[in-house]
Amino acid sequence: MPLPKLKKVRDVYLDHAATTYVIPAVAKAMAPYIETNYANPSSLYRLGRINNGAINDARRTIAQGLGTMPDTIVFTAGGTESDNLAIFGVAKANADRGKHIVSIGIEHHAVLHSLRELKKDGYEITFVPVDGEGIVKVEDIVAAIRPDTILITVMFANNEVGTIEPIADIGRAILKYRQTNKTIYPYFHSDACQAAGYLDLDVEKLHVDLLTINGGKIYGPKGVGALYIRRGVKIRPMIWGGGQERAMRSGTENISGIVGFAKAFELAQTSREKEWKRVLEIAKYLWERVQKEIPKVRLNGPPFGVNRLPNNVNITFMDVEGEAMLLYLDEYGIMASTGSACTSTSLEPSHVITGMGLPYEYAHGSMRFTFGKRNTKADVDYLMKVFPEIVRVLREISPVVLEEGKKHAKIHQR
Amino acid sequence: MPTKTKSKIKITNKKVVQKKNLKEEVDVRTPDGGGWLYSDIVKDHFFNPRNFMQYGEEEKFKFNGIGRVGSPACGDEMVLWVQIDPKTEKISQCRWRTFGCGSAIASTSALSEMIVENSGMKIDEALKLKPQNILERLGGLPNRKVHCSVLGDKALQSAINDFFRNTAQHSRVQTAGAKVIDKELNVTDHDIEEAVLEGAQNLEDLQHKLKVGVFNKEVIPQLEDLLRFYNEKYYG
């Protein structure tokens, strides 16, 4: 097919919400702990003590970023594990108090599938609906609270469409509920993995009791994360062993990972405001050009501004399927992602797009571009050299013509 | 245990000829990242699709059978136009359009090649085509892609059925795997689903499209049930 031939094909990474590279400053901080300072931090000899100190430093750094004390930070093996610890840990420890949990349907699978698992053990889950932009109403969350509700878990920022949830407002409302009803329940957990690079994570301002963060989305190493646990929260460990992390998460500490994660978190938090402005310009530029150059497109999630992560552009290209677009883009070295069923292992289309009340067809044709530190407008220019033509070609071989603006898209045969 | 003495048996890098076993997962990704999720044949069909209906060709292309399967709601959708020579009963030409992932597009393209090559496939033969035949032609597909993306045989069957209806050969209409609603016309629940997808909203639309229930009044309640069901499923 007559697709544009480029003189030079280069790699363009537009999938920072999937994961990020490790930046040199972080890699440099990690290096000594891989080959030289290898000792087990629990060991009493000098090398062990050095590493124990390094972990404590890292814990202090993370705690400072969250506006809390070091003893509230538990290092884990990533965001998924932190979410699992928060949910199962609270559920198991407070089962005598109640078995009801409140959440939203567009959560990450680390939360959704944990909740689904709890259902098998007799827990009840209420999913509060979100609006067409993916935002949940504070009053709807409060209305879902029952006397037996032990936990509310709402993500800070959505990984697919970039929606930022009103966490501080929800936190304040829960606090008020507790005061009025003279109870310490429900606890409030938030998954802030996507938010850590762009938003203030001060746990006192957010009024959260548990907060999930990780390294792999903020230019730190993968497989390392942390869970903030407010003092006094009743929670049980999920992994048992040698009693590390004050017995909340046993297992020899991933020392290089923890050091790198803390460095990455520190850098992400200090540069977040500047980085917000920079990537927002690139994201807006892409959306402007797509609107101008490709017909029948729709921005999924909130408009650019305070309610949307600045690096996220999620667009549905009507009548075309996401995986086919991805494969063409891959030929040009462009890396992005899609909400189409064809690329998911479950063969289910994006639960986020459908969770916002949009029809399946919108999910199948959705593409997510997420920008990061190394992107510039030149990357958008490179993408737009080939993308309009790719969509045009795939539309030509598609039998589907969707009518926009209907809740359930009508299909016409061409 | 690794030893320094070299074994006398020399192991040469044998070229492994892979036997086609379609039950085994086919995933040709290579660790260096240079490989592809799909086979070279699939890739070729995906990037260079054959026989698809180009813009502006719809008016000119002559056909006497059309088949449509799937729906974008379930991820894949395909339309196949065929030109069948009524005398020789061979498929002389075909065109298609597919909404779907790489394997869906490639498998339709491969099918379109199979049915028109060598002066065209006889329809009796074409009706016997199975997804496995298309898979073999493609050199396999990743396991989880098979059920959703190989719709070609169903589209072909539906197109040939349409040809039978257009040429008043109702007795030859194939109804395997579907529930027959109107015995005289061999109209199935699948046909009604397709009609709904094509815009049939009420009994009149349905009768206009399929002639169903015109002579055989007792099937009308069943038709109305199915109409309601599919309309709710897709547009509700």
Image (cartoon, rainbow, N blue to C red):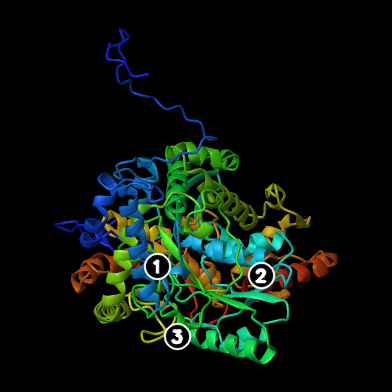
Pick the front one: A381 or B43: A381
Frontmost of labels 3 and 2 is 3
Q: Which residue is mark 1?
A: A367
* Dot 2: element: helix
Q: Amino acid at mark 2?
A: Lys
Residue A205: mark: 3
Q: Which mark is residue B233?
A: 2
At horizontal 26% and vertical 76% (from top left) the residue drawn is A271
The answer as to whether the residues below labels 3 and 2 share one chain is: no
Disc 3/disc 2 C-alpha distance (Å)? 45 Å
Depth check: give the residue in front, A302 or B67. Answer: A302
Residues tagged 2 and 1 counted as in contact (Cβ below 8 A): no
Amino acid bearing label 3: Lys
Q: Which tag is nearer the camera, tag 2 or tag 1?
A: 1
Chain where mark 2 sits? B
Residue B118 is at least partly visible in this image:
yes
Q: Is residue B56 above or below residue A46?
A: below
The answer to whether residue A410 is seen in the rendering is no
C-alpha separation, residue under disc 2 versus residue under disc 1 = 25 Å
Residue A60 located left or right of residue B78: left
Q: Position of residue A84 (x, y in %)?
A: 55, 61
**Quarter-wise, where is residue A65 in the image?**
bottom left
Front residue of A387/A44: it is: A44
> Which residue lies at the image location 60% right of the left edge and 43% below the top edge?
B127
Q: Between disc 3 and disc 1, whose residue precedes?
A: 3
Residue that protrudes farthest toward the front in the picture:
A45
Q: Position of residue B58 (x, y in %)?
A: 43, 65
